[in-house]
């Protein structure tokens, strides 16, 4: 055992697998070490993996050999007494499958083993205690997700100090498959909630070829139901994309609608944030321009909140709750247009039928096509900038609803002069139970653009969208 070491973290040929050098302080009485010191080790690059269980394997004789087991959680491994020869093989799906690393471990060395990397060791001394912290609780369900590799696999070609024919092995470990027959451990999944809405369908299209994405509509996970999130094995996920939302702005002003809006837009995101914090997940939450105080100019992410109606208040409350999750992206957007009923499709239908609509001309913003919003979310998850709020919409010059409507009329070959501009107050003068609308919805996109994302112009995408609409 080496004493006098400095605390250090070293990389290895297995991606994410780290070796930690631990200072050990000893005298004639024995030794002492800080085996796991979160603050110091995180500063050196160790993941904040959130251990919840500590296990110890005691090995009475030299030559006891265990493994190779890949488990569905991360592990922090060290030796409390004795020495081991440790061997690890990457059993995760991907290009590093089969990568192998070995090292002798005494109390001055620890290793961080990512989920899906096969763990094995051979005791080199009597009375060896092999200790590991894990970030999920053991269960029979979890054990069914293990992946195994034979200790004698010729591809890994592990040079065991004590030959396996002389070592102490269990019958189960002797029977594990060779690498060619191993079922690799798949990556943790992304769960998309609200998968049948406009954004959900756009995400389905964008991620159609990804086996690691799971889509859940309201029929499976209804966020209005407090029990909907219970019983889900969250350790199998890495990311939640909350594309669900109560969006009936006017209905939210009624007694029943107010209850449902708070349940879906505020209470459920708070529960998702708690789940994300507990299980180390990334939470993507889609919010709205309605949360901002209504004033002239583009809305910046750090502008003060000033929600006007019940819907807006519930969205603002959801944002504040999600911000408590350590890994989060709050994506604020505006004027979403996707598959199904939407403003653009309605205007195109009216134009083709010769209807001359009144359209509000004093609310100004930018369209956000659902495909573009899905692309922005995909970009954030691919690039992983700092957690926080990111505005996301199409780019280009802001326009009013009436200006957008006139453009749609022109695109379908109708007279754009048929669109009759009207003020918000005049449009809603004869209606009751109407929620207040923001007059200024254009979002500043500078923060998102600084991550490398280039928003597409709203009018260019509008032309493509209208061209793809059915003509009848």
Image (spheres, helix red, strand yellow):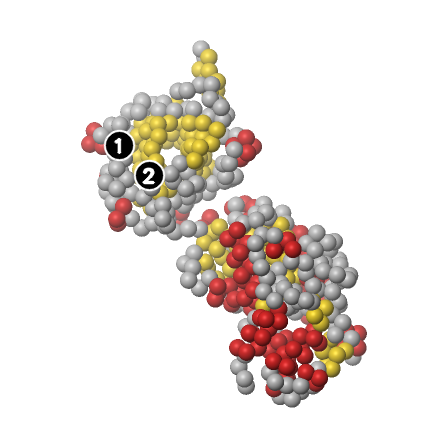
In the foreground, 262 or 176: 176
Residue 122 in view, yes or no: yes
Determine whether label 1 and label 2 are within 8 Å by CB: no
- State which quadrant residue 131 falls in: top left
**Image location (x, y in percent) of residue 211:** 41, 58
Q: Secondary structure at mark 1?
A: loop
The numbered dot on residue 385 is none
Q: Is residue 96 left or right of residue 359?
A: left
- State which quadrant residue 414 falls in: bottom right
Tell me if residue 275 comes above or below residue 17 in the rendering.
below
Q: Quadrant of the C terminus?
A: bottom right
Residue at left offset 65%, top offset 77%? 407
- Earlier in the chain: of badge 1 and badge 2, it is 2
The numbered dot on residue 100 is 2
Residue at left offset 65%, top offset 66%? 396
Tell me if residue 191 comes above or below residue 251 in the rendering.
above
């Amino acid at each position: 055992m080496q004493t006098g070491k400095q605390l250090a973290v070293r990389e290895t040929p297995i991606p994410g697998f780290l070796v930690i050098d631990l200072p050990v302080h000893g005298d004639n009485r024995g030794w002492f070490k800080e085996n796991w010191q979160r603050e110091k080790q995180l500063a050196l690059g160790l993941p904040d993996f959130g251990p919840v269980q500590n296990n110890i394997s005691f090995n009475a004789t030299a030559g006891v050999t265990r493994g190779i087991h890949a488990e569905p959680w991360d592990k922090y491994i060290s030796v409390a007494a004795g020495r081991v020869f440790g061997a690890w093989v990457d059993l995760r799906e991907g290009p590093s499958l089969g990568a192998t690393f070995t090292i002798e471990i005494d109390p001055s060395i620890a290793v961080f083993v990512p989920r899906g990397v096969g763990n094995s060791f051979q005791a080199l001394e009597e009375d060896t205690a092999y200790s590991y912290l894990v970030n999920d609780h053991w269960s029979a369900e979890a054990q069914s997700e293990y992946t195994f590799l034979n200790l004698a696999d010729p591809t890994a070609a592990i040079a065991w100090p004590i030959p396996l024919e002389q070592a102490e092995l269990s019958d189960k470990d002797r029977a594990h498959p060779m690498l060619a027959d191993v079922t690799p451990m798949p990556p943790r999944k992304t769960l998309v909630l609200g998968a049948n809405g406009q954004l959900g369908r756009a995400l389905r299209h964008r991620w159609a070829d990804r086996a690691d994405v799971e889509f859940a509509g309201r029929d499976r996970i209804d966020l209005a139901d407090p029990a909907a999130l219970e019983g889900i094995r969250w350790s199998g996920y890495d990311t939640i994309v909350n594309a669900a939302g109560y969006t009936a702005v006017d209905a939210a002003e009624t007694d029943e609608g107010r209850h449902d809006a708070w349940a879906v837009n505020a209470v459920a995101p708070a529960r998702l944030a708690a789940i994300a914090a507990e299980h180390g997940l990334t939470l993507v939450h889609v919010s709205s321009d309605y949360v901002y105080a209504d004033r002239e100019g583009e809305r910046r992410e750090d502008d003060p909140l000033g929600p006007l109606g019940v819907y807006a208040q519930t969205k603002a409350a959801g944002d504040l709750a999600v911000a408590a999750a350590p890994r989060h992206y709050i994506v604020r957007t505006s004027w979403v247009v996707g598959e199904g009923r939407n403003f653009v499709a309605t205007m195109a239908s009216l134009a083709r039928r010769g209807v001359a609509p009144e359209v509000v001309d004093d609310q100004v913003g930018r369209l956000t096509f659902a495909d573009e919003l899905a692309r922005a979310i995909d970009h954030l998850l691919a690039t992983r900038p700092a957690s926080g709020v990111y505005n996301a919409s199409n780019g280009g010059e802001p326009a009013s609803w009436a200006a957008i409507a006139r453009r749609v009329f022109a695109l379908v070959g109708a007279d754009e002069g048929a669109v009759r501009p009207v003020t918000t107050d005049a449009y809603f003068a004869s209606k009751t139970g109407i929620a207040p609308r923001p007059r200024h919805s254009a979002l500043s996109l500078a923060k998102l653009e600084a991550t490398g994302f280039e928003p597409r112009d709203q009018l260019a995408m509008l032309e493509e969208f209208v061209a793809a609409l059915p003509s009848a």
